[in-house]
Amino acid sequence: MDEKIKDIPTSMPTSIVERKVEVVPQITDLPTSYGDTKIVLLPRDPWWCFAYWEIGEQTKQEIKNLYGENVKYVIRVYDVTNVINFDGKNANKYFDIEINPLANNWYINVAETNRSWCVDLGLITPDGKFIVVARSNIVMMPRYGVSPLTDEQWAVLQREFERLLELSGVSMIGKGSFDIAKLMRERWEELLAISQLQQFISSGFVSSFARREVEQLPKEFYLKADTELIVYGETLPDAKLYINGDEFKLSDDGRFSLRMSLPDGEKVIPIKAVSSDGTMQKEIVFIVIRKSEIK
């Protein structure tokens, strides 16, 4: 039997379908430069700061046209501690660091702590003249050592410190977070009451009647005082440090700091550093005597 293929219409109904294509932006790396001429100074720790800079192409061409290529690039580091309106000529002192012309950042070691610094990116011509290319911001370095300031209202007395230590589980007494919260709340309310009372009296808005009310408070007189001991120092970062015979972890730059209670009596604190290969060692022994008198 013969089969006949039916004609298929050449024109078919069509429909328009809208397609929304979401364009995903390409993530590119940050540019290595922005065409500016500037230098920025950042503090790292009491002894080190970090500078990074950029010299624009136009500035590079001007340097080449005016001074040629036989110049030395330097960072001039100024000590501007307590200097008002630094202008490049009124620094306490300065020193130069010769740098590679292709460099764009540098770690700077400052020999003195607790100072303020500013740097110039510049060049020195063959005749010794210093040309400023860019000047940085002024930074005050992080302080080194124990702060001379104390805040008696927020000092944790030895008795309270020992209670907090016990509640933390050191003595395995099984206390819970409720006990810690209660102790902290009592301490907070005590400090808050003292602080508010002092601010209220010193504000100048207290009436004479209110002053009389303050004078009529219960005359229970007391005095609380205590001391603590802070031991700190430094050694080589790869050395091993022992305090009271126990190994103490050093920071990445070899420094250490330890806060200790200081009860009445004699306290002996041996501190020993041993080199990484074990061939050398140094030891310092602190002997601290506390004697309290209640009069």
Image (cartoon, grey):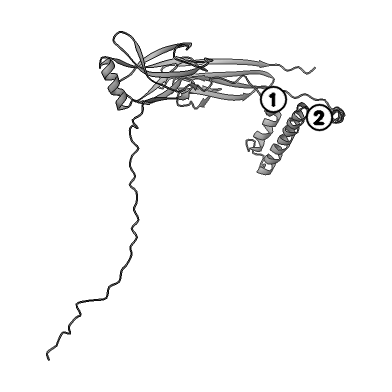
Label whose residue precedes the other's in the sequence (1 or 2): 1
Task: Please report the residue visible at 76 percent of the width from the left and 26 percent of the height from the top.
Answer: 202
Quarter where residue 209 is shown? top right
**x then y, percent, for residue 68:** 25, 16
Tell me if I can see residue 277 in this picture.
Answer: no
- Mark 2 sits on what residue? 206
Which class describes the residues within 10 Å of circle 2: few (<14), some (14-19), or many (20+)?
few
Task: Please report the residue visible at 34 percent of the width from the left and 51 percent of the height from the top.
Answer: 24
Q: Secondary structure at mark 2?
A: loop
Q: Amino acid at mark 2?
A: Val
| Above or below for 202 versus 169 | above
**x then y, percent, for residue 91:** 47, 12
Question: Which of 152 and 262 lies nearest the eye of the viewer?
Answer: 152
In the picture, measured across the screen, residue 72 lies left or right of residue 216, that is left
**x then y, percent, for residue 153:** 70, 27
Task: Please report the residue visible at 33 percent of the width from the left and 58 percent of the height from the top.
Answer: 21
| Image quarter hosting the C terminus | top right
Total numbered circles: 2
Which class describes the residues within 10 Å of circle 1: few (<14), some (14-19), or many (20+)?
few
| Above or below for 88 versus 247 | above
Question: Which of 249 and 173 lies nearest the eye of the viewer?
Answer: 249
Tell me if I can see residue 75 in this picture.
Answer: yes
Q: Residue furthest top?
A: 127
In the picture, measured across the screen, residue 277 lies left or right of residue 169, that is left
Mark identifier at residue 239: none
| Image quarter hosting the N terminus | bottom left
Q: Amino acid at mark 1?
A: Glu
- Mark 1 sits on what residue? 152
Quarter where residue 71 is shown? top left
In the picture, measured across the screen, residue 294 lies left or right of residue 116, that is right
Q: Residue furthest left?
A: 2
In the picture, measured across the screen, residue 5 lies left or right of residue 70, that is left
